[in-house]
Image (cartoon, helix red, strand yellow):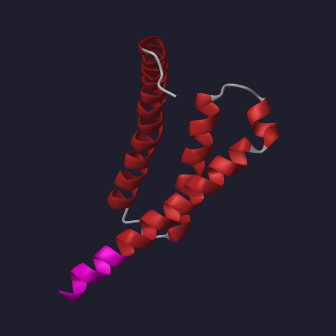
Amino acid sequence: MVASGGDIMRLLGGVIALLLPSFLVFVITCLLTAIPAAIAIWLSEEFRIRSAGFFAGAGAAIGALCITVLLRSPAVWTSGLVCLFAAAGFVAGLTYWFVVRELEAAEHSS
């Protein structure tokens, strides 16, 4: 079945209407995570912190902070959503620690 021109225009309008809020959420989320992550990385470099626990804890704190700022409701804490974001941040922090450790090992072996 071939769609009429009006249906295609409504579809395009709907797609465009969804892209702007999606883009704004993406930008806000990047800012909420990138700035605290940059601060944590700067602190680790400044004080020569190489602990996996530091990066895992910083990632978990950033994840919890991000969802708390995005959804300003006490129900976020009781629903378990904060735990999910904290767990994701925990894994992200450990991943960063692992990558940095591997890069430093490769740099010293050269």
Residue 103 lies within the magenta run = yes
Specify the segment rendered in magenta: 102-110
How far across and how far down the image is residue 2, in percent? 47, 25
Of residues 7 and 97, which is closer to you in this image? 7
Say above or below: 46 vs 3: below
Q: Image point 58% across, 46% down: which residue?
A: 63
Q: Image point 59% across, 29% down: which residue?
A: 70
The quarter holding residue 79 reads top right
Residue at the far bottom in the pictured view: 109
Say above or below: 20 vs 101: above
Say above or below: 73 vs 96: above
Of residues 7 and 62, which is closer to you in this image? 7
Residue at the far right in the pictured view: 78
Q: Image point 59% across, 55% down: which residue?
A: 88
Of residues 16 and 82, which is closer to you in this image? 16
How far across and how far down the image is residue 36, in percent? 45, 43
How far across and how far down the image is residue 68, in percent? 64, 34
Q: Image point 46% across, 42% down: which residue?
A: 33
Give the overall secondary structure of the magenta segment. Answer: helix
